[in-house]
Image: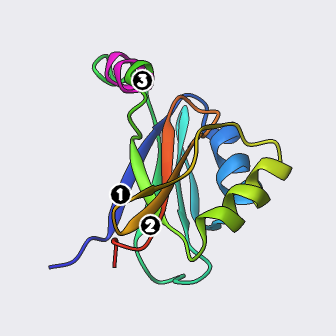
């Protein structure tokens, strides 16, 4: 058994697609019209056949209150591994990404947290996630 898909709930699929591809650097795997929405998945260019991230519409009645509670409490929805948190933080800040937590050592890890512009906080982490 392996993880094939993981989802992040987004308030606007097109805005999310632009942010996750143009800003974060993920690559489009699928973009299929599905009526009002799209089936959009992105992958890491480092692992194009790896786990796909679904940019999932957040319209289910339970999702938005859940996202709001996480956001209010400063809790990231998910985490992405990076080689160098400080370098990625600098790169993303230069692109206008807003961080709620700068690079911070946490035991064997270094983490930072940013706003994905689609209603989620996302953690980037170096070390301890292998």
Q: Tell me the residue that label 3 is attached to.
A: 59
Q: Give the alpha-carbon distance from disc 1 to disc 2, as whole Å.
A: 6 Å
Residue 14 position within the rendered picture, expressed as x and y whole percent measured from the top left: 68, 40
Residue 79 position within the rendered picture, expressed as x and y whole percent measured from the top left: 42, 55
Q: Residues within 10 Å of mark 3 (few under 14, many from 20)?
A: few
State which quarter of the image contains the N terminus.
Answer: bottom left
Q: Tell me the residue that label 1 is attached to.
A: 6
Q: Secondary structure at mark 3?
A: loop
Q: Earlier in the sequence, mark 1 or mark 2?
A: 1
Q: Which residues are magenta?
A: 65-71
Q: Tell me the residue that label 2 is attached to.
A: 52
Q: Work out whether residue 55 or residue 79 is closer to the camera in this orientation and state it.
A: 79
Q: Give the alpha-carbon distance from disc 1 to disc 3, as whole Å.
A: 17 Å
Q: Which numbered dot is residue 113?
A: none
Q: Is residue 14 magenta?
A: no
Q: Residues within 10 Å of mark 1 (few under 14, many from 20)?
A: few
State which quarter of the image contains the C terminus.
Answer: bottom left
The residue lying at 40 percent from left, 72 percent from top is 51
Quadrant housing residue 87: bottom right
């Amino acid at each position: 058994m392996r993880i094939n898909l993981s989802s992040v709930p987004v308030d606007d699929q097109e805005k999310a697609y632009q942010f996750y591809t143009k800003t974060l650097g993920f690559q489009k795997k699928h973009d299929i019209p599905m009526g009002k929405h799209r089936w959009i998945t992105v992958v890491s260019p480092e692992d194009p056949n790896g786990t796909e991230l679904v940019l999932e519409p957040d319209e289910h009645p339970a999702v938005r209150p859940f996202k709001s509670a996480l956001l209010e409490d400063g809790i990231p929805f998910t985490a992405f591994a990076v080689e160098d948190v400080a370098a990625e933080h600098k790169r993303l800040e230069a692109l206008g990404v807003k961080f709620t937590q700068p690079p911070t050592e946490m035991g064997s890890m270094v983490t930072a947290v940013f706003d994905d512009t689609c209603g989620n906080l996302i953690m980037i982490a170096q070390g301890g996630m292998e």
